[in-house]
């Protein structure tokens, strides 16, 4: 009976690395497909309870009033394994970028410094921001040519409606 000689270790290591690379590529492709519905430019067309939400965030009345009249354009894209959200308000603009499921540093339009994480929950894109002793959650969901963003902070809920541009 002939004894089989195991392959050299370099072959095993290269095969293992190749399998890991294929798995990583499949994961990126899967995430790209899941993100596809969000990747577009969106214009704010309506809001409910946004004044109360901005107050809960801790903004002063003047900033809350400004926030209520702005109609931002949000562009969501994916660059490699990062999700990019660019918000343009006419007064200022802000871009954040982070890998799904990984915490990153974020500075908001009102200059709050946060720890953020973006993740997919089924067909929803969720963005959690933590600062001081607060945590807000923005959940985006695409329905046809609309993106509905539900904001929640300490029980205060606001809903923003965007249309695809």
Image: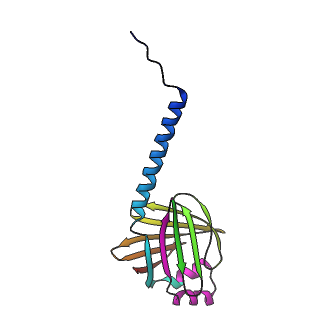
**Residue placed at 56% from the left, 81% from the top?**
54
**Residue placed at 54% from the left, 31% from the top?**
10
| Bounds of the magenta segment | 52-80
Snapshot colouring: rainbow
Q: Residue 92: which quarter of the image?
A: bottom right
Classify the position of the N terminus by image quarter.
Answer: top left
Q: Is residue 67 visible?
A: yes
Q: Residue 29: which quarter of the image?
A: bottom left
Residue 109, x across and y down, in percent: 60, 78
Front residue of 9/37: it is 9
Q: Is residue 155 visible?
A: no
Residue 59, x across and y down, in percent: 62, 82
Can you say whether 3 is above or below 129 in the image? above
The reply to whether the magenta stretch includes residue 12 is: no
View extreme (left): residue = 144
Q: Residue 67: which quarter of the image?
A: bottom right
Classify the position of the C terminus by image quarter.
Answer: bottom left
Front residue of 131/4: it is 4
View extreme (top): residue = 1
The reply to whether the magenta stretch includes residue 75 is: yes
**Residue placed at 46% from the left, 55% from the top?**
28
Residue 131, x across and y down, in percent: 64, 69
Can you say whether 139 is above or below 31 in the image? below
Residue 51, x across and y down, in percent: 53, 85
- In this rendering, would 91 be left or right of 31? right
**Residue placed at 57% from the left, 89% from the top?**
66
The mark total stands at: 0
């Amino acid at each position: 009976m002939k004894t089989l000689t195991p392959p050299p270790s370099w072959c095993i290591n290269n095969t293992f690395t190749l399998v890991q690379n294929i798995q990583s590529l499949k994961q990126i492709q899967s995430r790209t497909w899941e993100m596809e519905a969000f990747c577009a430019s969106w214009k704010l067309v309506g809001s409910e309870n946004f004044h109360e939400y901005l107050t809960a965030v801790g903004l002063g009345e003047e900033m809350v009033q400004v926030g209520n009249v702005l109609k931002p354009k949000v562009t969501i894209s994916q660059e490699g394994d990062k999700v990019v959200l660019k918000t343009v308000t006419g007064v200022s603009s802000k871009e954040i970028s982070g890998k799904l499921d990984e915490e990153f540093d974020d500075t908001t339009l009102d200059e709050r410094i946060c720890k953020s994480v973006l993740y997919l929950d089924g067909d929803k894109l969720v963005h959690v921001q933590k600062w001081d002793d607060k945590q807000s959650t923005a959940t985006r969901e695409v329905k046809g040519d609309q993106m509905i963003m539900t904001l929640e902070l300490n029980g205060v809920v606001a809903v923003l409606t965007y249309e695809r541009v």
